[in-house]
Image: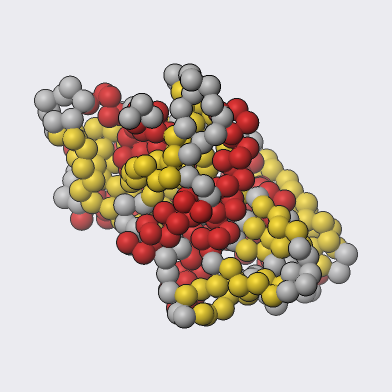
Amino acid sequence: MSASMHDVVGVDIGTDNVRLCYVKDNNILLRSCPAHVAFDGDEIVIGEEAKRCFDVNHVYNLKCLLGRTYSGAKEALGAQPNFDLVQLSDRPYIRVQSAHSMKFLLVEDLLSMIVSKLKNDMNVDTGPLSRAVVTWPGYFADTQRTSIRLVVENAGLRLTRVTTDSSSALIGYRVDEKYKTSQKSHRILVLDIGASFNINVVSFEEDCPETTYSSQSANLGGNALTKRIVDHVHNQFKLQYKKSLSDNSSALQKLALTCEEVKHKLSFEEDAFGEVANLIDNVDYGVGLNREGFNNLCSDLFQAMVGFIDETLLHAKCSKSEVSDILLVGGSVAIPKIQEVIRQFFGQTANIIVDDNPSTINVRGAAMIAERISYF
């Protein structure tokens, strides 16, 4: 490693993506990989390519399994996953049939593969990385935190420090610098809308941020929006072809992937189109949606998000007027309608802060911490 480089990297293990970030002298290096692993014979496929392996050896929703018992993992996953989850000593294992043998793997094993791949890719530009600062949700239980420690260590990184997602967001947006010399008390709201919706109310007093209230909803994030599109398109398909995909998990997985891509495009374009090759019985099926149609389709979910914010502030005993800054974090906050309803709720004068790439704010905050401690 060059003397001018350091060996500490920020790590964020998300529901949809695993991210590593390296910061040095305001230069930012990011690596991201979808949290998907597939097994094709004896070959292990990771990331974007794995998302397109539509068979029982394709494993996803990995974060949901971390630190849980078998029954807890089944409950967290909800619907029956398109992979073989089995119980061994009350822990959830993924059973994988390779070309020559049957394997039983823990979710920590799979996530370690992803972190290790990203680390090795980043090593080309940074030199060897050996330490990590990990960001995780403040509500994580001890068993979940222990699992993430194992993931990082099994990937060849020594865990140097941990930070909560709300603290990472403050640092990533440099709000900590904004108030570090302030003598007044400030309340900051962190709205983290990725696959799910997490809210943190942070009090900033005398250069010391403290998360005073947190709430979570798995039913009001990006996954819920994608599911709404999937259900809509599936109904259209049934009307057109007089067939249902309900018993075909592979077809539904293909459809969900295309609907997710269409949803993402609508954050930046007025109209979006995607095509599912061989959805079923050699039928190539097109998925088209405009932004207005998407907003109407999900209008109740957008309003429910506002209701969730209002409810959280009520429980936190915090009025809208007391909030100094509203930090938007997570990939779903790029959706224009979400930003619109949040601004309508708080008023046009509210100080709403959103980055061009809000899904990476947490890992960038962790990487900024990593740079600060790299000299110790």
Q: Is 26 in front, or is 352?
A: 26
Residue placed farthest to the left in the image?
Answer: 183
Q: Residue at x 24, y 32 (%)?
A: 324
**Colouring chosen for the image of the structure:** secondary structure
Quadrant position of the N terminus in the picture: top right
Q: Is residue 127 visible?
A: yes
Q: How many marks?
A: 0
Residue 161 is left or right of residue 336, and the answer is: left
Look at 43% across and 41% down and name the residue there.
Answer: 132
Q: Position of residue 330 (x, y in %)?
A: 46, 43
**Left or right for 115, reference 158:** right
Name the residue at 43% across, 60% down: 147
Q: Nearer the viewer, residue 245 or 214?
A: 214
Name the quadrant containing residue 362. Answer: top left
Residue sitting nearer the eye, 155 or 321: 155
| Residue 118, picture quadrant | top right
Residue 319, above or below 79: above
Residue 69, horizontal then vertical, whole percent: 43, 74
**Residue 277 at x, y = what percent?**
82, 56
Q: Along the line of sight, which residue is nearer the eye, 103 or 239?
A: 103
Does residue 298 appear in the picture of this structure? no
Q: Give me the residue at 65% from left, 44% from top.
A: 290
Specify whether 321 is left or right of 254.
left
Which quadrant does the C terminus fall into? top left
Residue farthest right in this picture = 282
- Residue 169 lies, in percent from the top left, at 36, 37
Judge from the rendering whether residue 373 lies leftward or rightward of residue 357; answer left or right: left
